[in-house]
Amino acid sequence: MTRCNAIVLDRHGGVDVLEPREIDVADPPPGQVRVRVRAVALNHLDVWVRRGLPNLKLEYPHRLGSDNAGEIDAVGAGVADVSVGQKVLVSPGVSCGRCEMCLSGRDTLCARYHILGETTHGGYAELLNIPAANVLPFPEPLSFPEAAALPLTFLTAWQMVVVRAQVRPGETVLVQGAGAGVGVAALQIAKLYGARVWATAGTDEKCARAKSLGADEAWNYTTADFVKEVRDRTAKRGVDVVIEHVGGETFTKSILATSRGGRIVTCGATSGFKPEVDLRHVFFRQIQILGSTMGSKSTLFDILRHVAAGRLRPVVDRVLAIGDARTAHELLESRAAFGKIVLEHN
């Protein structure tokens, strides 16, 4: 056992349930490594777990944090090609590695699939034990905070844009909530695949930043009717693909903005899980609504190659000390950030 500092929760609730504490972290068992976490990026998943989700069972004190970058601190028996002190990026999805789904590269469909910080401990602690299979090469020359801003959102966005929507060159893609981590990643990936990309965001400043990342058009959804804008620009046809992680009323409008035979890919619902849907728009126009969660571990190797080549890049809004976790959660909930909020361990 090794003592380390952490931010933990013992119950669900507001930001006040996040508490600093010293905890014990075991030596890594066979097949695992222990990572000294240098930076951990926030996701909306952190907020949902903190507040509480149906059927969510946690081992307390629980540590949030899916996106982690750091150095190998200790190596368990049977682990090769990894050395103490090595800089690493951590893949956030944990699966059994033995079932049909895992062996076919569809590990997100594994019955034992977990996400770090959700149903198993994450990087809101200085030390974190992970399977050796979750060790990724560190994306030089990025900093620890920049590297931590990559895994979950880029993996999720790649799965949505490339695997589920199968975006093709020349198609028009509407990225909802382009200021969020998934939106920032999806916008870049859709451009990488040759699409014309339109985006929505909650402020004029975020719209301008979306354009600086490659968006061809961007609308402030608080002041503009993006459905009208889409229909005006497409002679009422609509867009080929909508990348959706907002839910609520936005999802309802996304259906209206989609073309006949178009695809809507959804991975979340930050503004509401129960949108009002007129099914006539879905079946008469043969719209495909596709669910998506995370992506295969192997996909991250592709993503990291594009990052190394400068074709994709993480966007960090701000970096705070781990002790400011409550403030970071408040910022995330207020939607004040463009890109990722990252916490650094001392």
Image (cartoon, rainbow, N blue to C red):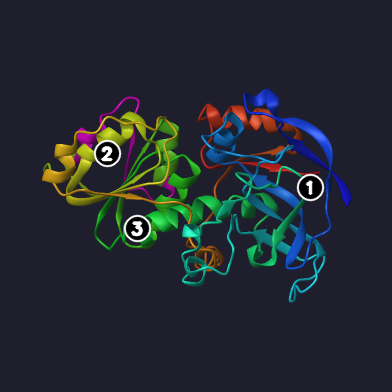
Q: Amino acid at mark 2?
A: Ser
Q: Which residues are magenta?
A: 212-230
In the displayed structure image, the side of residue 249 where residue 258 appears, left or right: left
Q: Quadrant of residue 328?
A: top right
Q: Position of residue 312 (x, y in %)?
A: 49, 59
Residue at which label 2 appears: 254
Dot 1 or dot 3, earlier in sequence? 1
Residue at which label 3 appears: 164
In the displayed structure image, the side of residue 298 where residue 129 appears, left or right: right
Q: Amino acid at mark 3?
A: Arg
Report the mark closest to the observer, 2 or 3. Answer: 3
Task: Return the residue nearer the eye: 259 or 208.
Answer: 259
Q: Amino acid at mark 1?
A: Glu
- Magenta stretch: includes residue 189: no
Q: Is residue 85 visible?
A: yes
Residue at which label 1 appears: 126
SS at mark 3 in the image: helix
Dot 1 or dot 2, earlier in sequence? 1
Dot 2 or dot 3, earlier in sequence? 3
Looking at the image, residue 301 lies above or below residue 239: below
SS at mark 2 in the image: helix
In the displayed structure image, the side of residue 2 where residue 271 appears, left or right: left
